[in-house]
Image: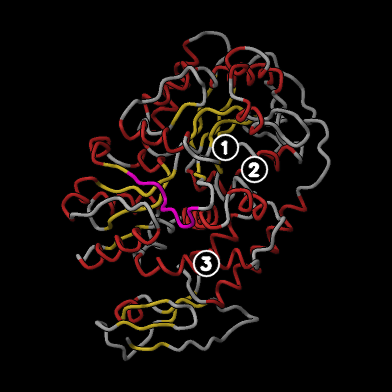
Amino acid sequence: MNTSPTSRRHFLAGAGAVGATALMSGCVTSGSTGSSSQSSGGTVSLQSNLSSPQAKSAMQDLIAAYNKRGGSKASLNTVASETFRTQLPTYLTSANPPDLLTWYPGSVADGYARKDLLLDVSDIWQTGELAGYSDALKKLCTDSAGAKVFVPASYYWWGVFYKKSNFAKWGVQEPKTWDEFIALCKQLKAKGVTPIGLGAGGGTAWVASAWFDYLDIRINGAAYHRELLAGKHSFTDPQVHKVFDKWAEVLPYFDPNGTALAFQDATTAMLNNRTGMMLIGTFFADAAPKDQLDDIDFFQFPIIDPQVPVAEEGPTDGYFASARTRHKAQVKDLMSYLATAEAQEVYLKGSSGTSLPTNPKAKDAGTPLVKKGRALIESAADVTQFFNRDSSDALQPTADTALTKSGRLRLRGLDPSARYLDAASGTLYSGAHLLHSGLPLAWTAEHDADLVVLTRQ
């Protein structure tokens, strides 16, 4: 993770420029949904990014249940989630795209709809179980031209997850405020425990964006956060500086390997007691053994300013269809089924069961963890989606690079047991960390030197 002020400025300038470019390039007039000949038969292809073992198995169960109904048929093609993420624009613009794809609603879907890549499915929202969905979900699935282009299937929450048995063993409690959270980190570190796992390596660098999201909505509020990601504020605003200043307070407590381990490996590290906790969405449970889920709990991301209305991250997942599909009627039939309570309960039963169904009649897993998660989202003053979902897929790689891939300079001649303060950033490093992991620096062709003064404490 990057803590130097220069690095922060580099990210802010880069993210601001790329974000504005990405958002401006999306500001085109949406026209027709494309033209392709309609086929009356054939199997609908569903391309899925749900590749963790439990989620993949649940999707297979879901498609099998649909095919047993008679009528239209569907086939499932599961792609590794990070491959899917990078290849999605290619899938949608190819001459023969998948008929249906898993992904996200909101600004991300709207970005593709503006390019005439998504099928208008407004008609299926008028009848059946979709007609009973909440107004909030109807709005979330509507593009900027007024067409519904998405069908939601589930949503989930983010929190700081930990093992109940470990907190009991260490004699620590869930924090509620930021000061209590920092105190908890200090307690764990004093016990020889790495306080926080990250999981921003191995193709899952986007996980680090959750820290930016939560710090921003806790300090500046959800409305400002959405406006920032929509390009209405600059990443060089003083409000954003406050986010990075607060981030610097917690960076000494992250796992030094946080940007080397994918979130699945970081989950394993937490389950194997190598780290104390991690900020993550409930999707991590699909990569965890089911027999360990009863020992998992979470707490709300700590409150920083009690005057700021409490918002939570509650991303929604589901499906959109290619505008080039040759099986429009069959695709809409499958999407209508995926919106049913029956379909969503089939999926929840086969997966870890830690997500929440979007169908108001569908039953969730009903576990204490899920009840606590539902209460967290329902009590929130506002709900955000996630960094790329509230901005664009195009902005996410910029954030990934800025937040996780800074250069590091290993230092020599330091006492590994001592602590060293960078007064300019306020960051306190251990000598061992500087010797082995190095000092984070953001050097580029235009900025290839830094002056950093470290004072031994």
Residue lying at the far left in this picture: please name it.
169
Location of mark 3 (residue): 244
Q: For the residues marked 3 and 2, what is the alpha-carbon distance in whole angstroms?
A: 25 Å
Secondary structure under badge 2?
helix
Residue appearing at x 47%, y 73% in the figure: 3
Location of mark 2 (residue): 108
Residue appearing at x 58%, y 38% in the figure: 104
Three-letter amino acid code of the residue under disc 1: Trp
N-terminal-most mark, 3 or 1: 1
Is 441 positioned to the left or the right of 197 in the image? right
Q: Main secondary structure of the magenta part?
A: loop
Around disc 2, counting alpha carbons within 10 Å, would you say few (fewer than 14), some (14 to 19), or many (20 or more)? some
Three-letter amino acid code of the residue under disc 3: Phe
Numbered-mark total:
3
Secondary structure under badge 3?
helix
- Residue 107 spot, x, y in % from top left: 66, 42
**Magenta segment range?**
298-306
Could one spot residue 287 in this view of the protein?
A: yes
